[in-house]
Image (cartoon, rainbow, N blue to C red):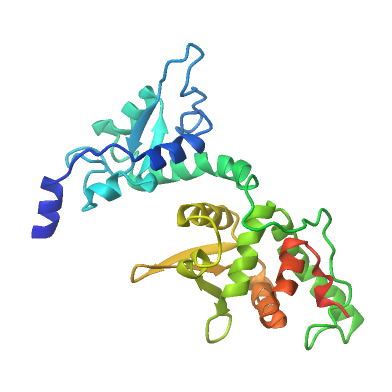
């Protein structure tokens, strides 16, 4: 309790770093993040109607001010969003503090930035690979142990796999690169239905982009239900999520990881080139 009081008393309103400011503007789309607001942040007369708003407030007695975040955490990009002056006053109105809670404003930021993340995600590749413009679906699954012996059962299994393949094929190439790297450097956990899991630090060690860019692409996958982000004792883990696994009883990311057996060319062929005939003979 004493530590928390000291943190509150020492709170200071720090300006965002230049990197944070750049990210905020990049994913703002030049538009206020308040739902249904269409106000531009940079107006036609070259003046700004743009304010940096805090999700968890700096002032203790303001809405969303009851926390023990550090000053650095308060100015982190995850705690900031861009609003027009009108809607900045709305979310910080003391009379509306139970309407615009931390969770509500966090969701506001996430919903607004998601569409711009998707647009920008395809601009930069992690690696230079040949993209597959057309999805190639498997036809017999005979390369997978225990699959492909019965034609009717094979047809059913391929039908079950199709939504997973479609979910991957809808991702921009740069996002599929991150999926492939997670598969290549991660491993399934021990036990039944344990997903492919990889440390963020492992990915940082094999790519040429910084951790913030990796996190942005991971958030894109998380938004689309293909990945979950877990922090355990200050270590960030990515877990691949097969959105169909609950229905079919097996995880296709685990199946692909096991089938590839460390051969990254198989992973790149399936995830990078969208050639899922790797499962065929």
Residue 91 position (above or below residue 142): above
Position of 175 with respect to 200 (left or right) is right
Give whichever of 127, 187 is nearer the camera.
127
Q: How many marks?
A: 0
Q: Position of residue 253 (x, y in %)?
A: 65, 73
Q: Position of residue 66 (x, y in %)?
A: 21, 48
**x 62%, y 72%: residue:** 183
| Residue 11 visible, this orientation | yes
The quadrant in which the C terminus is found is bottom right
Q: Position of residue 256 (x, y in %)?
A: 70, 76
**x 57%, y 52%: residue:** 220
Q: Position of residue 29 (x, y in %)?
A: 53, 32
Residue 92 position (above or below residue 103): above
| Residue 1 visible, this orientation | no
Spot the residue most to the top. Answer: 45
Spot the residue most to the left. Answer: 2
Give whichever of 184, 63 is nearer the camera.
184
Position of 60 with respect to 121 (left or right) is left
Position of 16 with respect to 133 (left or right) is left
The quadrant in which the N terminus is found is bottom left
Residue 107 position (above or below residue 206): above
Position of 26 with respect to 121 (left or right) is left
For residue 135, what is the image quadrant? bottom right
**x 33%, y 43%: residue:** 101
């Amino acid at each position: 309790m004493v530590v928390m009081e000291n943190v509150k008393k020492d709170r200071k309103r720090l300006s965002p770093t230049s990197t944070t400011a750049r990210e905020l503007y990049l994913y703002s789309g030049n538009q206020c993040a308040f739902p249904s607001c269409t106000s531009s942040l940079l107006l036609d007369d070259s003046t700004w109607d743009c304010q940096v708003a805090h999700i968890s407030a700096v002032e203790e007695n303001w809405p969303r001010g009851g926390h023990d975040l550090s000053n650095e955490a308060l100015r982190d990009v995850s705690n900031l969003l861009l609003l027009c002056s009108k809607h900045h006053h709305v979310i910080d109105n003391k009379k509306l503090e139970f309407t615009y809670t931390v969770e509500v404003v966090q969701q506001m930021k996430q919903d607004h930035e998601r569409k711009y993340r998707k647009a920008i995600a395809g601009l930069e590749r992690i690696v230079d690979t040949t993209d597959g413009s057309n999805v190639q679906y498997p036809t017999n699954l005979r390369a997978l142990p225990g699959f492909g012996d019965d034609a009717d059962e094979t047809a059913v299994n391929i039908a079950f796999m199709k939504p997973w393949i479609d979910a991957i094929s809808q991702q921009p190439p740069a996002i599929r690169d991150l999926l492939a790297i997670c598969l290549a450097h991660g491993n399934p956990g021990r036990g039944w239905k344990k997903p492919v899991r990889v440390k963020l630090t492992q990915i940082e060690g094999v790519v040429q982009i910084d951790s913030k860019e990796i996190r942005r692409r991971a958030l894109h996958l998380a938004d689309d239900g293909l990945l979950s982000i877990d922090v355990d004792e200050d270590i960030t883990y990515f877990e691949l999520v097969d959105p169909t696994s609950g229905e079919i009883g097996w995880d296709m990311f685990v199946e692909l990881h096991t089938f590839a057996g460390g051969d990254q060319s198989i992973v790149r062929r399936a995830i990078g080139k969208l050639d899922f005939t790797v499962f065929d003979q």
